[in-house]
Image (cartoon, helix red, strand yellow):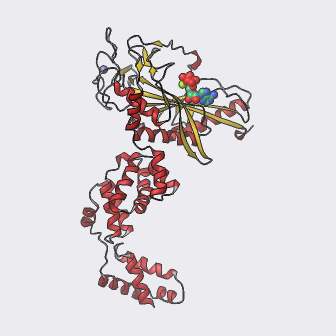
């Protein structure tokens, strides 16, 4: 059978590191990139006799995430021990949540090429991150860095509602933007702050039962996730078409070869022997506590998007792009207020700014200029100080050597020529040197005008005011 005869079923377990200042059960800092084993203490290194104390912020952030994804918040929750042995886990168990997670039964809406779709959130629970093994490049052994041990995580488990790599991509982007908006995680995927375990299975179209799934753990790039899913679907179709059965197992995606490999540990064989952590008390939340968190939530991407459609008349597509990042969305609103030209700000963000972000693989938060500077750029065009083609060069400069657009224009001598005399001189010169185009225009070839304007732009290295050029050429050619 062909791939089209199968339906793809995908569910995601997403881990997000919380942006709390301190770890989940001790007061060590959570910041990324410190020298190995400098953010540790007896608690997060599991010294005998130490006791964990739950960081209240962790509960608050998880509840924020739950409310922002329409979950029911459990008022009676607890921490459990998940037992397994691995050298980066000093206690030999991870404190997580088993049968009483903080949040359950939520949902996230995505807009795919086939329309709007609701993806169920099974649960969101809190847990601690493990440390990190650094494998010695000479093969002499591995060194453990426990800075990350005890960094708080939320795990967001989706229902197996996703049906394609496209839907997975949209779901993850939506989830990432929600977590950014509510400021519970920095979601820096390259630093591992947001990573997904991707569960994939296939079944014959129309079948009632799900097929057996495989799981690709700790994926932290959108591109790899899409590639890995596409590869895995093809692999499973192949296995079944050749009379085989898909085995439930954990796979490793290899970015270089573009293939998945078995990690030879059968998921089913894992017995975590969960039990309630006796060192921690139950988590009881009052109505008032949950209500207060609800009140403190900012406007979420979905609501902003709707507002952009009605208030600013953006297209659905543009509104989606802009609200996908809180940073872009703030940049849009603030700059629009300052320059009073939301249409222009929208165009800059959708076209040139997005293109530069893509080319340089830069996250919106890393944009080196602020809303005031973007607004100034728009106002400089509106006032006729620079042409839009010069403005594009100014924007590139604002990315490369961030400073005020006015300063860039001054330094580079890019001010637009709007002086009537100067424009007239250029027009005369161009007319003199291009008699053929002049004749063409007079013979009715409108296109020749564009050519002449282009020549004048070239002559002034893009600095002549294009509206004035147009007008003056027309006058001269009458
Ligand atoms: P665990 O991986 O801890 O055993 P679950 O069995 O609850 O947990 O499933 C984890 C994830 O796998 C969830 O996101 C769920 O939606 C997804 N999932 C479960 N069954 C399938 C399936 N047959 N195909 C694809 N995804 C699945
Ligand atoms: Mg799993
Ligand atoms: Zn510690």
Q: Quadrant of residue 300?
A: top left
Residue 222 position within the rendered picture, expressed as x and y whole percent measured from the top left: 50, 40
Is 326 on the left-hand or right-hand side of 235? Answer: left
Residue 14 position within the rendered picture, expressed as x and y whole percent measured from the top left: 49, 31
In the image shown, does 432 or 13 lie closer to the viewer?
A: 13
Q: In this view, does 425 lie above or below 33?
A: below
Q: In this view, does 364 lie above or below 197?
A: below
Residue 70 position within the rendered picture, expressed as x and y whole percent measured from the top left: 50, 35
Residue 415 position within the rendered picture, expressed as x and y whole percent measured from the top left: 29, 71
Asked if residue 204 shows in the view, the reply is yes
Q: Residue at the spot x=31%, y=71% of the render?
A: 385
Asked if residue 266 shows in the view, the reply is no
Q: Residue furthest top?
A: 49
Q: Which residue lies furthest to the front in this view?
A: 288
Q: In this view, does 304 lie above or below 39?
A: below
In the image shown, does 382 or 103 lie closer to the viewer?
A: 103
Q: Quadrant of residue 130?
A: top left
Which corner quadrant holds the C terminus? bottom left
Q: Residue at the spot x=45%, y=40% of the render?
A: 178
In the image shown, does 182 or 437 lie closer to the viewer?
A: 182
The image shows a total of numbered marks equal to 0
Q: In this view, does 208 lie above or below 428?
A: above
In the image shown, does 201 or 428 lie closer to the viewer?
A: 201
Q: Which residue lies furthest to the bottom in this view?
A: 478
Is 295 on the left-hand or right-hand side of 261? Answer: left
Q: Residue at the spot x=62%, y=23% of the render?
A: 248
- Quick check: which quadrant has ligand 2? top right
Q: Residue at the spot x=51%, y=14% of the render?
A: 272
Which corner quadrant holds the N terminus? top right
């Amino acid at each position: 059978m062909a791939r089209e005869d199968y339906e793809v079923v995908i569910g995601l377990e997403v881990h997000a590191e919380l942006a709390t200042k301190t770890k989940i059960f001790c007061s060590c800092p959570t910041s990324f990139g410190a020298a190995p084993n400098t953010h540790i203490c007896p608690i997060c290194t599991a010294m005998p006799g130490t006791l964990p104390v739950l960081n209240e912020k962790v509960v608050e952030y998880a509840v924020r995430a739950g409310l922002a994804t329409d979950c029911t918040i459990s008022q009676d929750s607890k921490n459990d021990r998940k037992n397994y042995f691995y050298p980066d886990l000093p206690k030999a168990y991870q404190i997580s949540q088993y049968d009483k997670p903080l949040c359950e039964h939520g949902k996230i809406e995505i807009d795919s090429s086939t329309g709007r779709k609701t993806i169920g959130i099974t649960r969101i629970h809190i847990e601690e991150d493990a440390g990190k093994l650094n494998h010695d490049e000479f093969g002499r052994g591995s060194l453990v860095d426990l800075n990350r041990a005890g960094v708080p995580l939320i795990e967001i488990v989706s229902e197996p509602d996703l049906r394609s790599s496209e839907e997975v991509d949209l779901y993850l982007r939506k989830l990432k933007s929600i977590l950014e908006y509510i400021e519970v995680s920095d979601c820096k995927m390259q630093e591992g702050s947001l990573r997904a375990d991707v569960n994939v299975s296939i079944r014959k179209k129309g079948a009632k039962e799900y097929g057996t799934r495989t799981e690709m753990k700790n994926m932290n790039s959108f591109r790899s996730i899409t590639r890995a899913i596409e590869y895995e679907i093809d692999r499973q179709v192949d296995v079944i078409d050749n009379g085989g059965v898909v085995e439930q197992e954990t796979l490793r995606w290899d970015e270089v070869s573009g293939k998945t490999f078995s990690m030879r540990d059968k998921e089913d064989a894992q017995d975590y022997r969960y039990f309630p952590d006796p060192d921690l008390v139950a988590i009881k939340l009052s109505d008032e506590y949950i209500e207060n968190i609800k009140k403190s939530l900012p406007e979420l991407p979905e609501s902003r998007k709707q507002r952009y459609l009605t208030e600013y008349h953006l297209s659905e597509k543009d509104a989606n792009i802009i609200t996908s990042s809180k940073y872009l969305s703030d940049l849009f609103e603030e700059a629009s207020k300052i320059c009073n030209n939301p249409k222009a700000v929208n165009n800059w963000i959708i076209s040139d700014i997005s293109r530069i972000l893509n080319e340089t693989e830069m996250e919106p938060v890393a944009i080196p200029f602020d809303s005031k500077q973007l607004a100034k750029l728009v106002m400089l065009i509106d006032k006729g100080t620079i042409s839009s083609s010069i403005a594009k060069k100014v924007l590139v400069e604002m990315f490369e050597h961030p400073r005020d657009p006015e300063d860039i224009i001054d330094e580079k001598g890019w001010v637009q020529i709007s002086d009537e005399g100067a424009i007239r001189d250029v027009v005369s010169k161009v007319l003199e040197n291009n008699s053929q185009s002049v004749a063409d225009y007079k013979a009715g070839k409108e296109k020749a005008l564009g050519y002449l304007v282009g020549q004048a732009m070239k002559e002034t290295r893009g600095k002549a005011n294009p509206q004035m050029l147009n007008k003056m050429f027309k006058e001269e050619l009458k």
